[in-house]
Amino acid sequence: MYQFLLNYISSGQVAVLGVLFGFLLTFLCLRFPFSFLPKDQGRLYAVDGAKSKGKIRGVGLVLTVTFIISTLLFLPFNREYIVYCILLFAMMLSGYLDDAAKNPWSDYKKGAIDLVLSILTMWNFLNYNGTTIRLFSNNIEIPVPVYFILGVVLIWVSINVTNCSDGVDGLCASLCCVVFTSFSILFSRQLGSYGETCLVLVAILLAYLCFNSKPSSMLMGDAGSRALGFYLAVIAMKSGHPFIFLILAAVIIVDGGIGLVKIFLLRFFKISILKHTRTPLHDHARKGKGWSDTQVVFRFSIIQILCAMVANFLL
């Protein structure tokens, strides 16, 4: 489709068609949702988790499939990107099966799947990319084994912190819109067509927000949040500035990461920290600080936009 359209319009205009196609296809698929999508059973330990009971869950399947179709139709791609799409689909599928399961999967099972897919992703990345990264104004050559390990850690962390941030209507999608847009603008030259895929994904998330903004009628579930975290890590590495991920995704990292650290220390080292702080942090803001869901989404997004501005000046 992409090569055919280039005979009539420019590559930029084809990309615009991809953005519009992704938005409209997602909107229509969510406006008339598939009957096989599971229903949320209510989250026992989340603030106001019971209010989600009965909502359509796992629409991350729709978001991911629409994204893959839109980018393959309207953007240039190569073998590297095809493998990323396969791994992205696998990540989404693992989350969807968890969403649809009567009994939630264990943390160890999901963690093992994340690790395997992270290793396969780094194998694919290193087949097509070097290990020189940009840190502010310095180029740093990292040994392949070290880069491989750091990349696996980055992908695994990104998947899980993004997953943890999906607990308030509109929060995860809104933050991801800011982060993907920031990467696309700040690293348009380095990312090339990958930057355009970011904008297609943002358009898809905007269509999803039409149904997920409070009061939501559907949830992306692990199928969506885990896939988003996966692709965010891929984009961070493709930008050549992987450490800027710490700033451009700062709110997602802090929101979901505090809980991961808290659980890790307690489970494996019997060290208890932040006893009076609910995690993820958005639950603390709602329960401890009395913020409404709308305030959480707007304030967290505002902070993330400010972080993007800071990153722009640092670069």
Image (spheres, rainbow, N blue to C red):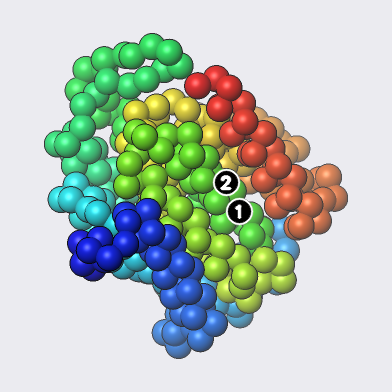
- The amino acid at mark 2 is Val
Residue 62 position (above or below residue 295):
below
What residue would you read off at disc 1? 174
- The amino acid at mark 1 is Ser
Q: Residue 70: image x %, image y %?
A: 34, 65
* On-image quarter of the N terminus: bottom left
What residue would you read off at disc 2? 178
Q: Residue 200: image x %, image y %?
A: 43, 58
Residue 280 position (above or below residue 257):
below
Quadrant in which residue 73 is drawn: bottom left
Is residue 292 shown to the viewer in this render?
Answer: yes
Is 302 on the left or on the right of 71, as rendered? right
At label 1, counting other C-alpha atoms closer than 10 Å, the crowd grade (few under 14, some 14-19, many 20 or more) is many
Is 60 on the left or on the right of 121, as rendered? right
- What secondary structure is marked by label 1? helix
Residues at discs 1 and 2 in contact (Cβ within 8 Å): yes
At label 2, counting other C-alpha atoms closer than 10 Å, the crowd grade (few under 14, some 14-19, many 20 or more) is some
Residue 78 position (above or below residue 307):
below
Q: Nearer the viewer, residue 149 or 25?
A: 25
Residue 261 position (above or below residue 141):
below
Is residue 262 shown to the viewer in this render?
Answer: no
